[in-house]
Image (spheres, grey):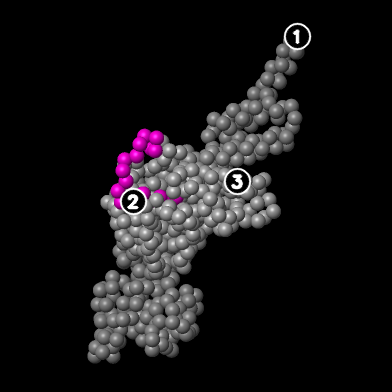
Amino acid sequence: MTSHRKLIGRLAGAVSTAFLASLALTWVLHDRMALYNARNLIDIAFHDVEGAIREKVDRRLVRQAMAFRDHLPSLRKDSAWNDAAKARGLLRKVAEELAVDELRVVGADGIIKRSTDRRDIGFDFRKASGTDAEFLPLLNSETEIAQTLLPDSRDGKLIKYVGVWLPEGGFVQVGCREANLRALARSAITGLTHNRHVSGRDGFIVITTANGTIISHPEEFRENGQWRDPDKDCYWRRMDIEGFPVYVVIPKRSAVVERRVLVVTSAFLNGVALVFAAFLVGLVIAAYVRAQLRAQRASEMTMASDIQESSIPRIFPPFPDERNVDIFASMKTAKEVGGDFYDFYFSGPRKITFLVADVSDKGVPAALFMMRAKTVAKGIAQTGKPVVEVVKEVNEALCEDNGANMFVTAWIGEIDLDSGCVSYVNAGHNPPVVMKAQNGGCSYLRTPPGLVLGAMPGVQYRSQEFVLAPGDCLYLYTDGVTEQPDEDGKLFGEDRLLKFLSEENVSVRPNECLAHVLARITNFAGEREQADDITQLIIRYNGPTVAAEPQAGKQSRLG
């Protein structure tokens, strides 16, 4: 009995020791994995913001170099220019005006002719090596070259050089040390990290001055405050980029999986380890982690879908007190989150802007770009600008920081509630269908479409106009309607859509039209999966003055 009890005690001790050891190992490995992932996210964030900062700083300093080049003809007319010592005085005055530290003029032969530093005179770039040789292309091409902030070989202090070609041959150089560089580029860097997040919505990027004054923060009200290093509850790192201290911060709570789940799981897996073997335990842990990651991703996708759903108007009629117009819309995404969207809102006392749009990509990236496009379009449209100006400004906004090269097709219109006149711009989108109340006829509103939004800045768009008579309807849609294939690969197509709309009594029941179109597409597809997001919007113009509707009529409009 005594030996039996000892054996039980030893087994219990071995099980407890194995459990605690495995639990501790799981805890340590979990922390290491979280730290590794956080470091990777921080490295990616630095790489992303580094390119943006350098682009802004390069552009600002190249502008100073061009200003020096423009000033050069007047300097050469000064009699002091022919004397190297007196010329240095002229150049130092110009350098002070431009808020830079060094100026050089290099001849077509590659030799420095004039400089704010007498030691530079006579230096031959054709014989240069290392970083100096980077400026040699300026002798043979009309371009600009910007270096990063590098140690000066003469005194070891950091300095940044840019060079700009000269029409008569050669080039000019501008050198700027850290203090002046920060002063020159500060305005360009301010606000650069607005809405830039790391690891979801909790991680962030901050840019400060040398003394810690915040000049860019995801939250605008934090700017101009004093930066303090995060506490131990965060992963963070600092990097100086072009003289600006940059901080990337990730709270640990957003970088790790909840430990309570891992602790409970470890207890179960330790029991399994005693029965099977260490390698089987490893397989079980791996499977569990994968399941947790899938569940976490599914939860994130559900959250993204909910956010997207909440951003799209879902209450119809949207303006119960406005009887001059009826608007109904629907969207059925092909995945958890989609790239299509529709919207409508007052853009003037008696004007409503309405639109349907389609982002080029799918999934979460497209949904994020969709939210950006929707917010930008609404913010600009509600300033009361003409629709053509709204589209132009939306295009410029979407072109900025569009590293993923996404674009949006959109049909954007603005209706005057008193006249029924619709001003619109088609940015590469499907032509809508006009449905006349008087004869029940349907036809596509075909006009030459403009370029899609977000593809290229500087695009000029043209607006068109037409008038809806009382009872007329306008039907907007995305290509998920016409490009849905059936089981044999045949597309639903524009002709089939137009025929179906012609058969519908749209002017009487516009609220039922969208559901009928969706049902017809579903029947057409059969067993074939939905190929793309299906988004529809229909607007009926009731005339400048509409009598109050009976109660039953109100209920039918909510159908």
The type of residue carrying mark 1 is Met
Residue 208: horizontal and vertical position, in percent? 35, 55
**In the image, what residue occupies the spot 69% across and 17% down?**
9
| Location of mark 1 (residue) | 1
Q: Quadrant of the C terminus?
A: top left
- Label 1 residue SS: loop
Instruction: Mark 2: give few (<14), some (14-19) or many (20+) Cα within 10 Å.
Output: some
In this view, the mark in front (1 or 2) = 2
- Label 2 residue SS: loop
Q: Earlier in the sequence, mark 1 or mark 2?
A: 1
Residue 377: horizontal and vertical position, in percent? 38, 55
Label of residue 72 in the image: none
**In the image, what residue occupies the spot 68% across and 50% down?**
487
**In the image, what residue occupies the spot 46% across and 61% down?**
445
Closer to us: 366 or 79: 366
Q: Residue furthest front?
A: 439
| Location of mark 3 (residue) | 522
Mark 1 and mark 2: Cα distance apart in space: 99 Å
The type of residue carrying mark 3 is Thr
Closer to us: 519 or 131: 519
| Location of mark 2 (residue) | 543
- Image check: 189 left or right of 481? left
Q: Which residues are magenta?
A: 538-554
- Image check: 531 left or right of 193? right
Q: In the rendered image, is residue 204 in sight?
A: no
The type of residue carrying mark 2 is Gly
